[in-house]
Structure formats: structure tokens, C-alpha cells
Image: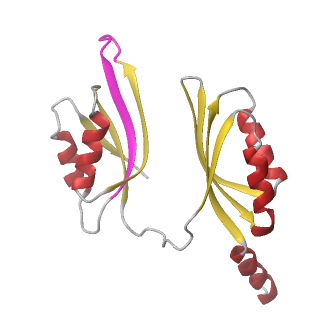
Amino acid sequence: MPMHLLSLGLKRELFMKQLVITILGQDRPGLVESISSVVLQNHGNWLSSNLSHLLGHFAGIIQLEVAEEHFQSLQSALNKLPKLDVRIETGNTEIEPSTLEQINLVITGNDRPGIVQELASVIRHKGANITHLNSRQQSAPNWGVPIFSAVATVTLPNGMNKDEVIEALESITSDLIVDTEEV
């Protein structure tokens, strides 16, 4: 790559703000389109997101980047979206990318109050960290009993074998099944 183009790329990166946006409000058709249009119209770049519909509400977390000169207009436009609570945080770009091993745990068991707390506590006590969690409750086919299921991305501390975490989680109760899938 020619040096002048490389320096332009570096200058661009220096003046780009990395943002984490959280949005909560009543869900409605076209909401994601409205949010993404505001981002595009204000020169933002949508990098990553987790968006959900929960009990009639929209809950989203979005990672964006925007040039410094467009930040205020983007912030203002997002805050003007009707009937939505918007929170904007500047991301920490000084954090080094993780070289730690990540695993996806697929967890299934009988649902009960406190199951997420128990899982999180075991993972923390092993020195691991939950970086992403999707969970839900559903009825078990043919039983009608509520079943808890989750997929958790977990970062392991250096030197830890994933089997240590799996065994610790499965020791919580005999009805808990923990499998892994590729990250």
C-alpha cells in the first residue's frame, strides 16, 4: 500500500470514536431500520450488535464507529429517536485483543430461580469470564416442565483446561448438561 494511503488510514483511525450504544423502548415494526438509518445519515459505521425483542420491548446494544466531527450530530440524532432510552458510551480502544482461549458453552437443565447466578458464580470462581450470554426458558417437550437453556461465551484464564469449567458447572446439579461448540 502506498505510504500516503497508509498514513491516511492511520489518521482516519486516530479520529474515529468507538461507541457502545444501548437502546431500550417499546418495540415496533421498522425500529431497527430507523436506528440504522440515523447511524448511516450521521456517517456512523455499524460494527456489531445484539438486538432482542423481550415482552414487547426492544433491547439493543450496538458497537459503532464515527469520525470525531460527526459524533455530536450522531449523538443528537440517536437521542431524538421517539420513545426510546438511548445511552452512548465511548469504547476503550486501548484494551489489547485477548489472546486467552474462548469457549462456547451450551447449557441445558431444569429451570429454577437463581440458575444464572449459580452458573455465573462457578465460572467466576474458576477465574473465567462470561463475555456473552444468551439464555431462555422454554417448556420441555412431552413434560411441560420449564427448561433453562443458554449459550455462554467464556474466556478461560491462561493454563485452564475447558473441562475444569464444564465439570464444575455440571457439579451444580445432576440435571445440568454442558456441551461445547466451536467459537
Residue 143 rendering spot, x and y as whole percentages: 29, 11
Range of magenta residues:
140-155
Residue at the spot 27% in from the left edge and 26% down from the top edge: 112
47 or 167, nearer to the observer: 47
Q: Is residue 132 left or right of residue 160?
A: right
Q: Which residue lies most toward the bottom here?
A: 3
Residue at the spot 32% in from the left edge and 10% down from the top edge: 142
Looking at the image, residue 29 lies above or below residue 153: above
Which quadrant does the N terminus fall into?
Answer: bottom right
Q: Is 44 within the magenta?
A: no
32 or 167, nearer to the observer: 32
93 or 98, nearer to the observer: 93
Residue 10 rendering spot, x and y as whole percentages: 71, 80
Q: Which residue lies most toward the right here?
A: 41
Residue 55 rendering spot, x and y as whole percentages: 54, 23
Residue at the spot 77% in from the left edge and 89% down from the top edge: 3
User: How is the protein colored in the picture?
Assistant: secondary structure
Looking at the image, residue 14 lies above or below residue 115: below
Q: Is residue 114 left or right of residue 69?
A: left
